[in-house]
Image (cartoon, helix red, strand yellow):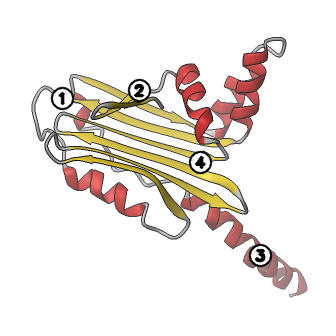
Amino acid sequence: MKIRLGQFALACLLLPTLGATQEAKLKLPDFSALGGKATESVNISLSPWLLRIAAACLDDKDADSVAMKRLLSGIKSIEVRSYQFATDSAYSAADIDAVRMQLTAPGWSQLMQVHDRKKNENVDMYIMVENDRTSGFALIASQPREFTIINIVGSIRVEDLPRLEEHLRLPKIGAGQANIVM
């Protein structure tokens, strides 16, 4: 009985920690049906194991590779969904709004919001911070003929995002006159 009580107590102590980490991972809709409609699509899912393999392949003698390895060490997963279409409204805005609603949960803070009503372009950037460290990053960019969702779980500095984009070949996000590189 003592062992079970001890296991239960340990589980109760760990649950808040596990739950906090999971909150940074967004539940993305199944966009697989959009692949056939899209003129261009990007679907990236990098698990911790794949990120460790990528880091292991980097050269320890190159300063840029060492910096990238350090950056990857704080990341637990990366999800990217990006689709472009030949016509307007080829995707459900409700799916994008469902992801955006998750970012209203406690812990998420909006870093940036760009909305151009004339062009119907929207870019929202969020970050989750726990104990003075980032634990999640999310970006949602949508236009009538395209959208991109990026979700990074783990610790990353916003200023490191361009380096990550370069090495992982993540899509560039355009927002009106600004060009946001992710």
Q: Residues within 10 Å of mark 4 (few under 14, many from 20)?
A: many
Looking at the rendered structure, the secondary structure element under dot 4 is strand
Pointer 4: what residue?
153
How crowded pointer 3 is (Cα within 10 Å; few <14, some 14-19, many 20+) is rated as few
For the residue marked with disc 1, what is the amino acid? Phe
Q: Residues within 10 Å of mark 1 (few under 14, many from 20)?
A: many
* Mark 2 residue element: loop
Q: Position of residue 83 (x, y in %)?
A: 28, 32
* Residue that lies at the very extreme toward the bottom in this rendered image: 1
Q: Residue at x 43, y 55 (%)?
A: 27
Look at label 4 and name its amino acid: Val
Q: Which residue shows up at 64% across the image and 42% down it?
A: 157
Q: Amino acid at mark 3?
A: Leu
Instruction: Pick whichever, 79 or 124, lies toward us.
Output: 124
Residue contact between numbered discs 3 and 2, judged by CB atoms under 8 Å: no
Q: Give the numbered dot on residue 85.
A: 1
Furthest-front residue in this view:
177
Q: Which residue is mark 2?
A: 171
Q: Earlier in the sequence, mark 2 or mark 4?
A: 4
The reply, left or right, for residue 62 in relation to residue 142 is right
Q: Nearer the viewer, mark 2 or mark 4?
A: 2
Q: Position of residue 97 (x, y in %)?
A: 28, 57
Q: Secondary structure at mark 3?
A: helix
Q: Which residue is labeled 3 in the image?
A: 13
